[in-house]
Image (cartoon, helix red, strand yellow):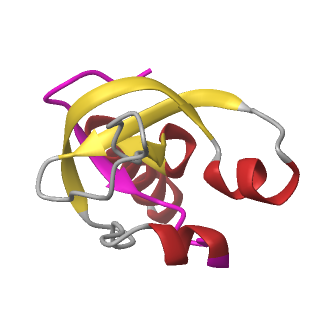
């Protein structure tokens, strides 16, 4: 889905309270970030609440650093909360084109 060095934008900042308690730094809505690592992650809010291990793609971002667990693994962010910057630019361009066609 994403790759190291890719620019991404946060599109979902509805952080559960459990995440706010664990993380020192959270991304800001509609801000551009660069991916510094991509890996499989565990949803912290679900793991804490009911011990289910839901695996999904996790991102680490340049400039944001968070605590590590007992194994030395830094807490990442669910990739589903981000969109690729290129993808958003393309959608904006297409929306402008459609708007011009509607006006004409």
Above or below residue 85? Residue 95 is below
The answer to whether residue 90 of the structure is visible from this angle is no
**Residue farthest right in this picture:** 50
Q: Is residue 99 left or right of residue 33?
A: right
Above or below residue 40? Residue 48 is below
**Residue farthest front in this picture:** 70
The quarter of the image holding the N terminus is top left
Above or below residue 2? Residue 14 is below
- Residue 92 magenta-drawn? no
Residue under the point 34% across and 48% down: 68
The quarter of the image holding the C terminus is bottom left
Magenta span: predominant SS is loop
Q: Position of residue 2 (x, y in %)?
A: 36, 25
Q: Position of residue 23 (x, y in %)?
A: 41, 67
Q: Is residue 37 left or right of residue 48?
A: left
Q: Is residue 99 left or right of residue 59?
A: right
Tell me where the magenta segment starts and ends, as one range. Answer: 1-17
- Residue 2 magenta-drawn? yes
Residue under the point 34% across and 68% down: 30
Q: Work out whether residue 58 or residue 29 is closer to the camera in this orientation and state it.
A: 58
- How many marks the image carries: the answer is 0
């Amino acid at each position: 889905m994403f790759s190291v060095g890719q620019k991404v934008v946060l599109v979902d900042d509805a952080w559960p309270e459990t995440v706010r308690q664990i993380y020192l730094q959270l991304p800001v809505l509609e801000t551009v970030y660069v991916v510094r690592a991509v890996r499989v992650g565990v949803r912290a809010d679900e793991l804490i609440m009911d011990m289910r291990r839901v695996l999904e793609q996790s991102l680490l971002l340049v400039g944001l650093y968070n605590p590590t667990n007992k194994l030395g693994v830094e807490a990442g962010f669910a990739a589903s909360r981000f969109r690729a910057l290129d993808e958003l630019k393309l959608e904006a361009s297409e929306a402008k084109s459609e708007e011009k066609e509607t006006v004409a």
